[in-house]
Structure formats: C-alpha cells, structure tokens
Image (spheres, rainbow, N blue to C red):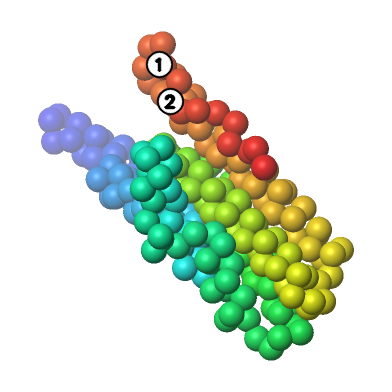
Amino acid sequence: MLKRGSGLVGGFAAFVLLLSGGCAVNPLTSQSDARREVVAEREVLADAVKAVETAPWPRVEEVSFISRITGAASDDRMTRSKAVDVYLEALQPEGARFFMLAGDANANLAAADRLLAAADGALAAPRLTMNDVVMLETAIQALRENRQIYVNAAKQLEKDGEPVDETRLNAIRDSYASAIRELGRSADALADKIEQDSTENYAAPEPLHRRNFSGV
C-alpha cells in the first residue's frame, strides 16, 4: 500500500510540473536578474546625463558663497564670459560661426531629448533612489548654463558684425525652455514615485526631496 501511495504522489508531482512548464523559478536567479536590470537602467540614465553635460567649452567654475562675501574669488577660474571667448575662438570659419553654434546647441538639445526618454523609462524601474532625481537636477542645471552660453556667444557674434539668425536663436531659446520644463516634470514624477514607494513601506514618511524642478 505504501509503495502504491508513493507512486501516486510521484505521478501527481510530475503532472503539476508538466502543467507549470516543466521548470521552477529560482528566486536567487530572479533577484540577480532584477539587480542587473536596475544597474543597466541606472547606467543608461547616467550616460544620458553625461551627454547633456558635455559642452564644447571648459567647465564654468562657480563662485562659492564665502568667496562672494569676501571677494576672494580667484582670477584664474573659468567664468562664463571666459567660456564664451574660448568657445567662439574655436568656432570656424568666421562669418558662419552662428550656424556652427546652432548645430552645437541642437546636438545638446537632442541629448536632452534622449535623457528625457531615459528618465521617463526609469519610472518603470523596480527600484528608484534620490540619486536618480539628483542626476536629473544636475542635467537641468547644465542645460540652463549651456543655454546662457550659447545665447551670450550669439550676442557677441552679433556685436562683432557676424550674421545671426534671430528667428533661429529664439527657437533655440524656446527649445531649451521646453527641455528644462519636461525634464523638471520627469524629475517631479520620479520624486513622487519614490515617496509613494516609501509610503507603502513605512508609516508616515517625511517628504524626501524638494519638489518642482521644472522652473525654466
């Protein structure tokens, strides 16, 4: 009787295994796959941010709060004005430099579009951190700085008597404003999702981050 019962149990187990596709899910493998997916998504986001931050001039060095008060800012630091001069010197040929500038600005805006797609895609990620939001904030700041340098450079070209397409320059300004606004919206959405996930796991959480990143 025991032998017959064991056979029935074994047959039932085989039947269940057949219905389930003949394989079992390994929880360790699933967790490992999930971790790799999170890392891959974060790398895509980080690479997209780096592309937005890349600019054809030296990085502008901000003046610290203390230096502003004491007036002790170094004369050797890279200011926005110096960055504009370095950029314009690199643009060639003269007479067509605005069109080169417009091409660089459009390439930067295209990188912003790719970042927006990566950020919106990150909303579906199983695990988000405030580092993701901070990366977007950094990119938004870079876009604001890049916009200002492109506009200042175009104005300098105009002062130097070179042709500048005002309609195209205004379009560049508007495109930057739109990119900053959309990335701010995406940063807000990521912050909301992080706070929502925190609410589901902890009682009465405090707000995790400042909101409304979309100011242009």
Whether residue 117 is visible, yes or no, is: no
Q: Is residue 188 above or below residue 38?
A: above
The residue nearer to you, when weighing 24 against 163, is 163
Going by the image, does 3 lie left or right of 205? left
Going by the image, does 123 lie left or right of 110? left
Q: CA distance from mark 1 to mark 2?
A: 8 Å
Of badges 1 and 2, nearer the viewer stands 2
From the top left corner, tell me how far across and down residue 215 is, in percent.
65, 37
- Which quarter of the rendered picture does the N terminus lie within? top left
Q: How many marks?
A: 2
- Which quarter of the rendered picture does the C terminus lie within? top right
Going by the image, does 200 lie left or right of 9? right
* Rendered residue at 49%/24% (across/down): 196
From the top left corner, tell me how far across and down residue 203 is, in percent.
38, 12
* Rendered residue at 59%/80% (across/down): 89
From the top left corner, tell me how far across and down residue 200 is, in percent.
43, 20
Whether residue 198 is visible, yes or no, is: yes
Going by the image, does 204 lie left or right of 171? left
The residue nearer to you, when weighing 215 against 183, is 215
Residue topped by disc 2: 208
Contact (Cβ within 8 Å) of mark 1 with mark 2: yes
The residue nearer to you, when weighing 198 against 171, is 171
What secondary structure is marked by label 2? Answer: loop
Residue topped by disc 1: 205
Task: Tell me the number on the disc at residue 101.
Answer: none
* Rendered residue at 57%/54% (across/down): 145
Type of residue at label 1?
Pro
Type of residue at label 2?
Leu
